[in-house]
Image (spheres, helix red, strand yellow):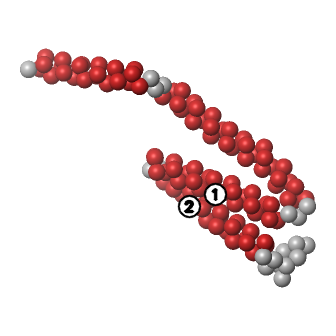
């Protein structure tokens, strides 16, 4: 009876290995691709965001600054929200909530500046 169980276990392992080979998924390659996409997204935000940030600070363009920061916060809220959904790690939930709150603050401030309700010196408004 013991030999029969061992044979069934070995057959089951072989079936799992065969299915894995047929799927032709290389987990290492998938992980490397994921890391590449993550680094590319971060680099694109830095490469495009830093010049816009410097421009908006130098020339007093608060709308541009708030739009950029709000966009980045929305992206990271979604990114970490999905990471939390997949991994259930609390750090992703925490970061997602913080980014979502920051996005809402940026959107509110953007709307106030766009409507001319800001009291920031040099930018006009009430």
Q: CA distance from mark 1 to mark 2?
A: 10 Å
In screen coordinates, is 76 left or right of 91? right
> Mark 1 or mark 2, which has the lower sequence index?
1
- Tell me if mark 1 has few (under 14), some (14-19) or many (20+) residues whose alpha carbon lies within 10 angstroms of its own: some
Where is residue 108? Give x, y as percent: 69, 71
Left or right: residue 104 versus residue 53 is: left
Residue 92 or 44: which is nearer the viewer? 44
> Which one is nearer the viewer's eye here, 13 or 117?
117
Q: Quadrant of residue 38?
A: top right
Q: Secondary structure at mark 1?
A: helix
Question: Does 64 sit left or right of 28 as displayed?
Answer: right
Q: Secondary structure at mark 2?
A: helix
Q: Nearer the viewer, residue 112 or 54?
A: 112
Eye-nearest disc, 1 or 2:
1
Residue of label 1 = 74
Residue 47 at least partly seen: yes
* Quadrant that contains the C terminus: bottom right
Q: Residue at x 81, y 77 (%)?
A: 116
Residue 4 vs 76, above or below: the answer is above
4 lies above or below 47: above
Q: Could you tell me if the residues under marks 1 and 2 are in contact, i.e. CB atoms within 8 Å?
A: no
Q: Which mark is residue 97?
A: 2
Q: Give x and y (percent) for residue 102.
A: 65, 63
Q: Position of residue 106 (x, y in %)?
A: 70, 66
Q: Where does the image place residue 41, in percent across and percent down from the top left?
A: 67, 42
């Amino acid at each position: 009876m013991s030999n029969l169980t061992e044979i069934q276990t070995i057959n089951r392992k072989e079936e799992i290995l065969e299915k894995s080979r047929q799927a032709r998924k290389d987990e290492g390659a998938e992980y490397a691709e994921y890391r590449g996409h993550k680094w590319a997204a971060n680099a694109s935000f830095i490469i495009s965001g830093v010049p816009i940030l410097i421009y908006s600070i130098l020339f007093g363009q608060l709308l541009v600054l708030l739009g950029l920061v709000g966009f980045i916060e929305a992206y990271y809220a979604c990114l970490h929200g999905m990471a939390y959904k997949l991994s259930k790690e609390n750090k992703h939930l925490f970061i997602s909530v913080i980014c979502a709150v920051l996005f809402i603050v940026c959107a509110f401030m953007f709307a106030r500046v766009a409507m001319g309700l800001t009291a920031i010196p040099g930018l006009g408004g009430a």
